[in-house]
Each structure stands twice: as structure tokens, then as C-alpha cells.
Amino acid sequence: MNRWVFSFITGAVSSLLWPALPPTWTLPCLFLAILIAYKLHLKGFSGLLCGIFWMASVGHTQASWQLSFMQIASIQRVQGQIVDISHHPERAVFIISMHSSDLANTPPFWLPKPKIRLVWKHPPTDLSRHDHIHVAVKLKPTHGLANEGGFAFDTWLRSQGGVATGYVQSKASGNVVEAIVGKREKILNQLQTLKLSQHKWIAALALGDRSHFSDDDWHMLQRTGLSHLVAISGLHLAMVASGMWLLARLSLISISYFSPLTQTINYKVGVTILVLLGCIAYAWLSGFALPVLRACFMMSIVSLFFLFRWTVGISQIISLSLLAMILVEPLGMLSGSFWLSVIALCSVLMVYQVVFTQAGQADARIGKRVVHAVGGQFMLNLMMLPIVAVLFQHISLIAPLVNIVAVPVFTFILLPLCLIGVLLMMFYFSLGDTVLTLANDIFAYALIVINWISVQPFAASPVEAMPWYVWVMFAVAILGIVILRSILSVGVASILLLPIVTHAYEPKKQDTWQIDVLDVGQGLSVVIRKNNRSILYDVGAAFDTGFNMADAVIHPFYAFHRLLPPDRIFLSHLDNDHAGSLPYIQWKHSEQTIIVSADHCVAGQVWQWQGLQIEALWPLNPVVVINNHTSCVLRISDGHNQVLLTGDIDLLAEYLLVNEYLDDLRSDVLIAPHHGSNTSSSSRFISAVKPDIVVFSQGFWNRWDFPRQSVIERYVRGAPEAKLLSTSEEGQISIEFHPQYPDSLMVKGYRKDINPLWYRQ
């Protein structure tokens, strides 16, 4: 059984590395192969094939909901229930589970309902979770920005079961909202009436509602390593289970004391069932968040083993829990939170076995147990370090010490107070108010200390981006030290730790340079980099919601490649899609020289940078008005290859450029003017540049339909051998230049070359 389960998990997890789903015609063949392997008693092989078959089937089911061109181009009506929501000024962003729609038939009851993420500007009423809506929408397929180091929104949405994104047609007739206020929402509303200063922290701890947390709150928690304390998961469920066990035990003992049926009561069965019911009730109270459901799976499996008196080891608990997670939420494997839950589960069980069981039994003195507890906390943080570093690009240095104090305070004081207060509030409001006020005061003092710790320079440190195999070797080394704890394991671990030590000193190439056209949606941002230094041309857009391309794309990209802050920032012009994120760039890198066409970007200006020549070609004269026509045009050359950056210049600017420079405009790479608008890319300009590679930087299914088909046809006619690439299809586009081999340009797209995975296409 263990072999089959492990093989199934291996086959399922392998889907994370597939560049494409197996063709549908292979599914019957896989099923037949499973039957044959099972008949031949090849348990490991049959489990492996079952895992592959399961994930391939799930992937094709999800892919079957992809929208057709007609569905994208037209308004659809959908009906469903809101399952997650976040409120913003003048708009609501929510995910609905579709009950029916114009898109396709309702799926069978045994399949999960597809979800779509919608934005509704100025909704007619306050929306809340569980509300039923029937609205007119305009949708796009699931898609996200695709850059090295950036957040994979499309992968995250797929992990939630999402198949499309879009917005509600606010002015359409027939939009209906049926408000359904569940018990959880009523409790949240009651909490708000108490006017507690730490209301959001109480709601997070007791009900799993973190919708009111600000970016500063999350920043504070991440720097102190305390995010797990407000993300309801196994720790909270274990506390609830302990409380329920004590309550159930006392209740049954009391009943048996006054009842003649003492001999007929099976205490273990009764207590276990009550504990499970309590955990399920808490999971309901927290909105059945996925981390809580995962913890419930593990609790249920352990309870079954206990009830049937089966002797199991930690490896069986972990493997069966992981099997249950994969079967219930297969696409959940695409999210980082899934692996945080899995690794946290494994780490806690291993640390408990190694430290608290063996070491705790060796010496029962309180002082020794405290030492073991501190050692266990350090060991737990060490085991969690690789996944935390990969997902968040930084680690909390103070986390082990902070958690030693914070975990008991949150677990044994704040969590019970919050839960008891919420329960009392449902039956006796004033008494619940008193308990929650006490919890509020404790939170206030605790947060003062936590906030002070978080602002200390030693609290956290950014982590350099490293290849996945470096972190795998690091994780194996830590496991060897924690589990084996022998001289041999320490020696092997030292060898495995060498890559993480030497990676920081990896020699950099001195003769090559490259440009990266970042995927910033409908906008432009280009990084020119060499020898760990860079120049930035345009910075992408920023929006009134606070979302900006500096924090979402540029800073993560710089961290991923360990680049120093840019030496210069060139802005082609000041439109939002090119310069909107500048304030955020300035906040991060305040000492960089910023050049726009109104000051130093004038034809004839030349900058020498690490052997590259950067020359301004346009505007021809200093300008007062900065607009598309006067965009800063740069040519970058290493003496062999040339790149032309054109901003949003129009047909007139192109005409004057051709007249001024004639054949001197020839370039190997051209960043297409104005994202492929029909107001640019004239046939005469294309013929003068004669590019080998043309890059269009534009948003996925943008409303202007860039690049226009007429523009593409002009490039096909004017530069028939040119390779046409777009960031909406490729994601980030990187082009590497080798001065020794000027005719050999290395071109890579993020989706097809850098990170070719089926769930990112």
C-alpha cells in the first residue's frame, strides 16, 4: 500500500514539470496500462500511472473550459455564488463558482464547478461572500504576467479552479444580486459593531478573515516570521482539537459518574468523534479555507487510525494526507500555499519525533524541555527555509526567537479568548464583548512589540534568487542532519551545502549583454543588462488601486537576477503605460539618473556604458511638450549588433527619422513603436530598420487590438525574414548578444523557453 501511494504521489507531482498535457487519446491507453500493471501486481508502476492519469484528466477537464474567440468577443451571462471577495474603493473583486452560464453546460455534480474572477465597478449594493449573482460579463481566458521572479497570477487562479477573468457590465440590464448573509458573515458584522481597535486581528484569528489586512500588516508579519499565526491552519486546528479533547473528556467522565451506563461508554470513540466534530465546526467558522481543509484531512486520517487501533508511522500519515489533498484539490498543487502546508506538516511531525519525543523522554526537567523546545523551533525554521526563500525571496532572521514567545501567546491565550468570545457573542452578547475586549487589549500590546521587532534591521534579510536544484540540495542536507544526526550525515550535508555557498560567487560573463522586454501588460519596460549592472528603459503602468509594475515585475526581476539598482532610467515619454510606476522606482532606487526627452534625450546625445554605446536619435531638438510624437528613441550598439527602442513614436516621427538617418537605422532588434498601433510602423520605416527580430509589448486581448493585423502585415512585407514576438504570448522576452558571434542571437520567451509548463501557456 505504501509503495502504491508513494508512486501515485510521484506521478501526480510530476505534472508540475510537464511542458504540455498528454494528448487526450493517450488517456484510454493509460487506463489500459493501469489495469495491466495492476493485474501483474506491479503496484509501484500502477500507482505511478494512476497519478499521471489523474492529473492528465484534471488538466483536460480544466482546459475544456477555455473560452472560444466568440465567447471572448461577446457579452455573456453567468450565474453563480461568490466564494471569495475583496473590497476596494469604488469596486469589488471577487471569485464566483458558476452554477450556469452561456459559456457551456453545467458540469456533472461529481466535478467541481468552474470559477471565474470578476471586477465590478460601482456595484449597486455591498457584495459579500455567499451572495448569489446573475450578471452580464465580458471575459478573457485565464492569463497573467509572465516574468522571472514575478508572481504567477494565472497559475494561482488555476489552483483555485479559475477558468477565466473579466468584469461585470455595470450598465447592463438584468444584473441581479441575491444577498445571502451566512452565520459567519453575521458574526463578522457583529464584530464590527464592537468598534474594537484590533478588530481585524480578532477576525483573522477566530474566523480566518484577513480581508482587512494592509500591506504594512503583511510586511510586519513576514519580517517577524509570524504569518502562520494568522493564517488558520494545522496549528489552530490542533489547539481546537486539544480544547475539544479536554472538554469531551470531562463531559464524558461527568456523564459516566452520574449514569449507570458507565461500562457501555467507549471513551476513546466518543472523544475522538467529538474532537472531529469540533474541528469541522471550526473549519466551517473559518470559511473552509484550504489550509484548514488540509489539516482536517490529516486529523481525520489520524483519527481513523486511532479508532481502528492501526499502528502507523509518520511516513504513512504524511503520504496518506498528501494523497487525500491531491484527490480532493488536485490543482491546489499549483499554489505555493499547498506546498507550504505539506512541508510544514512534514517538518512539524519530523521535529516532534526527533526533538520532543526522543529528547523530551531523555530528561523530564523543565529546563531541558525548554532547551529542546527552543532547539525544535530553530530546527523547524531551518527546515522551512527553502520553501519560504523560494516563495517570498526573503527570510526572517528573528523568527525562531519570536516564535518561541509568540506561538504560546497566540495559541494558549489569544486564540482561546477569540474563539470563546465569538461563541459567547452568539448567545450572550455582553459577555462575549467582555472577553473580546480583553483579547483586543492583549493584541494591542503584542502588536506594539511585534511592530518594533519588525522594523529592526536584523529582523529579516532578502535571499538571493538561486536555481531550484540548489534549494533541493539544501533541503536534503537539512533533512539528513535533522533525521540521521550522525558524523556521516554531517559530512554528506556539508557537500550538499556547497552549491548554496558558492552560488553567490558564481563568475559573471564579461563579454555578453542582453535586453529583457518585460511582460508589463499594456505598456513597456526594457532592461539592458551586463555584468550585474543595468539600464532601464520605461517602467510600465501604475493604477489607482496601488498595483504597479515596479513592485509586481521590475523589483522581483532585479532580485531574481541579483542586479544592482539601474545606473540610468530612460523614460520615452510620460504616459502612464510607460512612466506610471516611476514613483515606486524612485522610492526603491532614489539615486538613479532619470532621463526624458524634455531634458537630455535629444538627438546627438551619446552615453558610453560598459563597452556599449547608447545614442539618442529622437527628438531631433529639445521639446517642451512630451507626448507620443516626442518619445525618446535610443539605439544601443556593441559595434556589431544594434537594438532600437522607439517608445510610442508616430508616423510623422518615423518619417523624419528616416529622412535624418536614412540607412543608418538598420538594427537587429526593434521594439515595435506604440505597441503595434496602426499610427506607427510605416512601411518606409520598417524597410529602413530591416530588423531581424521585432518585439511587440502589449496587453493580452487588449481593447485596442494591438498589434493591429495591418501592422503585422506591413512587417511581413517589409521584413519577411524578421521574427515577430509579442509579450502577451511569450511573456518576458530575453535576447542575448555575443560580440564574438554577432550573427547568433539567443532569443528566449518565458512561456515557451524559460519556464515551459502546461499551466502557464
Image (cartoon, rainbow, N blue to C red):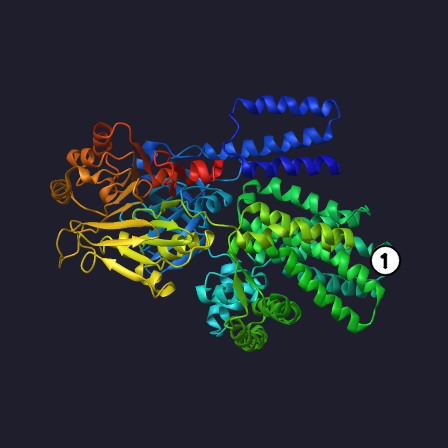
Please count the marks in the image. 1
Note whether 511 is above or below 292 in the view shown.
Answer: above
Question: Is disc 1 surrounded by few (<14), some (14 to 19) or many (20+) residues within 10 Å?
Answer: few
Q: Position of residue 159 (x, y in %)?
A: 51, 44
Note whether 675 is above or below 622 in the view shown.
Answer: above
Label 1: state its secondary structure. Answer: loop
Q: Position of residue 549 (x, y in %)?
A: 36, 54
Q: Where is residue 112 in the image (x, y as percent from the top left)?
A: 52, 39
For the point 47% across and 57% down, the residue is 181
Q: Mark 1 points at which residue?
A: 261
Quarter of the figure with the N terminus:
top right
For the point 84% across and 62% down, the residue is 259
| Quadrant of the rendered image containing residue 14 | top right
Q: Position of residue 98 (x, y in %)?
A: 44, 42
Q: In this view, does 507 lie to the left or right of 362?
A: left
Q: Which of 206 and 716 is in front in this view?
A: 716
Residue flagged by tag 1: what amino acid is it? Leu
Note whether 148 is above or below 243 in the view shown.
Answer: above
| Camera sees residue 665 | yes
For the point 64% across and 69% down, the residue is 401
